């Protein structure tokens, strides 16, 4: 599931490899964008759009 990450222009929901966030300050999303990680607020989940690149990459990997 794509999770909210602030990325300068407000924020986007990127998808990440792995089962869960291990507390590292930055992570590389599936779209290869490095994003600073922070605990997302409820508003972030509602307001941030889903990253199209992450979304389409995941969809393309499904059988
Ligand atoms: Zn992304």
Image (spheres, rainbow, N blue to C red):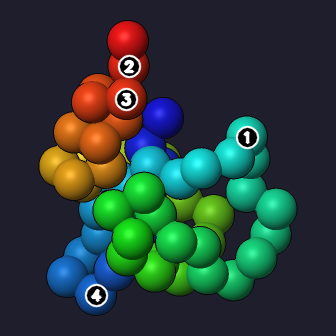
For disc 2, the marked residue is 62
Can you say whether 10 is above or below 59 in the image?
below
For disc 1, the marked residue is 19
Cα separation between marks 2 and 4: 30 Å
Q: Residue furthest right?
A: 22
Q: Secondary structure at mark 1?
A: loop
For disc 4, the marked residue is 8
User: What quarter of the picture does the C terminus occupy?
Assistant: top left
Label 4 or label 1, whichever comes before in sequence order: 4
In the rendered structure, are the residues bearing label 3 and label 2 in contact, judged by CB atoms less than 8 Å apart? yes
Decide which of 22, 59 is in the foreground and name it.
59
Q: Is residue 42 left or right of residue 38?
A: left
Q: Is mark 2 within 8 Å of ligand 1?
A: no
Label 1 or label 2, whichever comes before in sequence order: 1
Label 1 or label 3, whichever comes before in sequence order: 1
In the rendered structure, are the residues bearing label 4 and label 3 in contact, judged by CB atoms less than 8 Å apart? no
Cα separation between marks 1 and 3: 17 Å
Residue 52 in percent (x, y) is at 17, 49
**Disc 2 residue crowd, few under 14, some 14–19, many 20+, Cα 10 Å:** few
Residue 32's quadrant in the figure? bottom left
Q: Is mark 4 within 8 Å of ligand 1?
A: no
Q: Secondary structure at mark 4?
A: loop
Q: Residue furthest top?
A: 63
Q: Does the image show residue 44? A: no
Label 4 or label 3, whichever comes before in sequence order: 4
Label 2 or label 4, whichever comes before in sequence order: 4
Cα separation between marks 4 and 1: 25 Å
């Amino acid at each position: 599931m794509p999770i909210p990450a602030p990325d300068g222009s407000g924020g986007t929901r990127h998808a990440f490899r792995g089962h869960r966030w291990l507390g590292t300050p930055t992570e590389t999303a599936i779209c290869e964008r490095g994003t600073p990680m922070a605990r997302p607020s409820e508003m972030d989940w509602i307001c941030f759009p889903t990253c199209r690149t992450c979304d389409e990459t995941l969809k393309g990997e499904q059988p």
